[in-house]
Image (tube, rainbow, N blue to C red):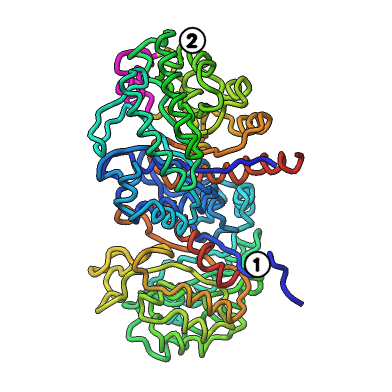
């Protein structure tokens, strides 16, 4: 019997800071996710009063308490916030702090404290994984031994801290990350405490990076602690991620080819990820935990969620169910 | 004999209004096979069992899919059972197609002889009609006109019955038979064997007719439902506004909303309780036409409506 649960990331409903702030928007999105066959939601960290689901303080401000938010979710058919994505490079209006870097030892205490803040709330919301942006972009800093050692120290401390709340820390590697270069990710995984730090496997970020997500799972079956099912519509095969300020020039504008959309929901036409194959590899690896569908951004969030639900119900759940019967 | 715990008496169909954005602007699902597949996936994903459609889609089914049976194969490939009901959206006109005018009847009867032949390759439960012309083309509504109209539909019902399909009447708030007394008079002249009632919860509500009470009175001849909501009741001349009431009435730009909408006027809990009390078995169709108006979104409205069916209504009766 495997322990796979299916969630959906809410970030596609909030393309801009002033979107998705009202309760009725949340209710319709949660009901859409629920009826499409998903049980949990993944939140993305945000800051300020227009981020009602961005951090524990804003959740309490909007729902009275974390328990109040959980009751609201349950009234919409969603049982848990399965995971929260935290990027330490975001500022925090709640804490009056600017960007923090996992490469800067002076920032480490602040990162650990914020990670604990999210982990404590996640535990109350039924969640189990804190995703962290594992490293800055490749154009900012090379992944030399010193940088990787500092990252390993930071995330091992964070992982041990969140574990106290029953929440595991999983490194999220995006296609702009310095960890995409050479064997940096392999080295970082080797340097981190395997009991404290795992990997959040994002199928699209890997695919856009030219990395086969199945190969990563096979190499690190015990380190994959969280999975994001997101499709990729293009590959950065010219390594444009190395150019300066790639966040704007490549991720946002699409690079020299002006790729209109790097990512899409599972189930999209012309996607490059074989989700049935990834699911089988996860089952072979004995994966147990959340698989979160994500579109990242979508021109049509409800349709993205329903297309994902169709793939889940018609193709992926039967694969998982068959595996359960066999085992 | 008790029912098995998982046996369902109700199945859910979706009436196929839909709009989405294509690369050149808004499209409906019939734009391409790809957009049709996307639509069917979304309907299946939220748990509908089947779909309804309009009979003006017939020509595209022939031209683009090889006929109704071939189109239905595509529907079935996406995990849906079949096409359950066809809405016969006729071009009412007092010159040649007006049920209260006997001189137009032969034209209408011939229309149904031809239409039913076209659909004979698939199994249908109902062919749904608006039983009267636009209100302003029929007024004043008299007992004579209602009787003449009923006589027409009795004959049409005989034709459709010959194909194993029920003729059922859907009373738009802007058609000539929409008030409670006129509906009652109309059914008193129709033959229950050949003419059924199709309850559209929103249309009756807009016309100040309680759909639950109407259903309870006529449950024995109700052959289906459109479960949809509204936030407005027609006032003044809304029901007889020229040239159109449905999308041009000055008071209300959007009449219809999905089941589960805030501030909806239809009491779906009472409706489903009545369905249970009458031991109705068969299909309930969910509809929310014009859901995209004023920034609405068909996919989201469909998800919210289906969520309501699963999490509220199926707890009453399923």
Q: Is residue A249 magenta?
A: yes
Chain of the residue displaying label 2: A
Relative height, residue B143 to residue A164 (above, below)? below
| Apparent side of residue A43 relative to residue B109 in the rendered image (left or right) | left
Q: Is residue A309 magenta?
A: no
Q: Residue at x 40, y 47 (%)?
A: B20
Q: Residue at x 54, y 86 (%)?
A: B190
Chain of the residue displaying label 1: B
Residue A146 screen position, x and y as percent: 41, 9
Residue tagged 1? B8
Residue B266 screen position, x and y as percent: 41, 73
What span is in magenta?
A: A240-260
**Separation of disc 1 and disc 2 at Cα?**
57 Å
Task: Answer with the quarter of the image where residue A133 lies.
Answer: top left
Q: Residue at x 29, y 18 (%)?
A: A245
Image quadrant containing the N terminus of chain A: top right
Of discs 1 and 2, which sits in the foreground?
Answer: 2
**Disc on res. A139:** none
Residue tagged 2? A182
């Amino acid at each position: 019997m495997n322990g796979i649960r299916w969630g959906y990331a809410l970030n596609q409903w909030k393309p801009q800071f002033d979107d998705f702030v009202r309760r009725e928007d949340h209710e319709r999105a949660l009901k859409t996710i629920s009826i499409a066959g998903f049980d949990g939601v993944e939140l993305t960290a945000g800051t300020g009063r227009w981020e009602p689901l961005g951090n524990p303080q804003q959740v309490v401000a909007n729902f009275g308490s974390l328990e109040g938010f959980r009751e609201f979710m349950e009234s919409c058919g969603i049982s848990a916030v399965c995971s929260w994505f935290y990027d330490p490079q975001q500022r925090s209006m709640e804490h009056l702090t600017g960007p923090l870097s996992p490469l800067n030892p002076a920032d480490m205490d602040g990162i650990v404290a914020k990670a604990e803040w999210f982990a404590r709330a996640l535990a109350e919301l039924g969640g189990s994984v804190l995703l962290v942006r594992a490293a800055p972009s490749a154009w900012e800093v090379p992944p030399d031994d010193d940088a990787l050692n500092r990252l390993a120290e930071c995330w091992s401390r964070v992982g041990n801290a969140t574990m106290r709340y029953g929440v595991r820390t999983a490194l999220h590697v995006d296609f702009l990350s310095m960890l995409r270069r050479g064997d940096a990710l392999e080295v970082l995984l080797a340097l981190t405490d395997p009991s404290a730090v795992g990997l959040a496997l994002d199928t699209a970020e890997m695919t856009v990076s030219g990395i086969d997500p199945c190969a990563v799972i096979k190499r690190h079956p015990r380190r994959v602690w969280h999975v994001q099912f997101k499709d990729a519509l293009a590959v950065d095969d010219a390594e444009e991620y190395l150019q300066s300020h790639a966040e704007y020039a490549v991720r946002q504008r699409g690079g020299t080819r002006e790729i209109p959309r790097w990512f899409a929901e599972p189930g999209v036409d012309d996607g490059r990820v074989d989700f049935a194959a990834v699911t089988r590899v996860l089952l072979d690896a004995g994966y147990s935990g959340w698989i979160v569908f994500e579109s990242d951004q979508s021109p049509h969030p409800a349709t993205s969620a329903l297309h994902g639900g169709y793939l889940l119900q018609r193709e992926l759940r039967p694969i998982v169910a068959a595996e359960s019967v066999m085992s | 004999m008790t029912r098995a715990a998982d046996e369902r008496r109700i199945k859910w169909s979706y009436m196929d209004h839909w709009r989405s954005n294509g690369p050149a602007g808004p499209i409906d699902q019939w734009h391409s096979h790809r957009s049709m597949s996307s639509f069917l996936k979304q309907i299946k994903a939220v748990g509908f069992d089947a779909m309804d459609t309009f009979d003006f889609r017939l020509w595209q089914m022939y031209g683009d899919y090889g006929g109704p049976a071939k189109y239905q194969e595509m529907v079935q490939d996406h995990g849906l059972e079949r096409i359950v009901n066809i809405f016969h959206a006729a071009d009412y006109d007092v010159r040649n197609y007006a049920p209260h005018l006997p001189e137009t009847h032969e034209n209408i009867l011939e229309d149904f002889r031809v239409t039913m032949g076209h659909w004979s390759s698939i199994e249908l439960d109902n062919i749904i009609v608006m039983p009267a012309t636009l209100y302003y083309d029929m007024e004043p509504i008299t007992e004579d006109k209602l009787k003449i109209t009923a006589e027409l539909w009795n004959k049409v019902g005989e034709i459709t019955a010959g194909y194993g399909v029920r003729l059922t009447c859907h009373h738009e708030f802007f058609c000539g038979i929409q008030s409670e007394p006129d509906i009652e008079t109309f059914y008193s002249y129709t033959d229950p064997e050949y003419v059924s009632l199709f309850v559209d919860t929103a249309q009756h509500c807009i016309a100040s007719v309680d759909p639950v009470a109407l259903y309870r009175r006529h449950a024995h001849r109700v052959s289906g439902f459109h479960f949809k909501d509204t936030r407005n009741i027609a006032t003044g001349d809304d029901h007889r506004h020229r040239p159109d009431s449905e999308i041009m009435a000055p008071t209300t730009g959007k009449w219809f909303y999905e089941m589960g909408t805030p501030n909806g006027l239809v009491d779906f809990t009472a409706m489903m309780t009545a369905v249970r009390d009458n031991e109705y078995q068969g299909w309930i169709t969910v509809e929310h036409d014009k859901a995209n108006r004023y920034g609405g979104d068909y996919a989201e409205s469909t998800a919210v409506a289906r969520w309501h069916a699963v999490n509220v209504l199926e707890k009453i009766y399923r």
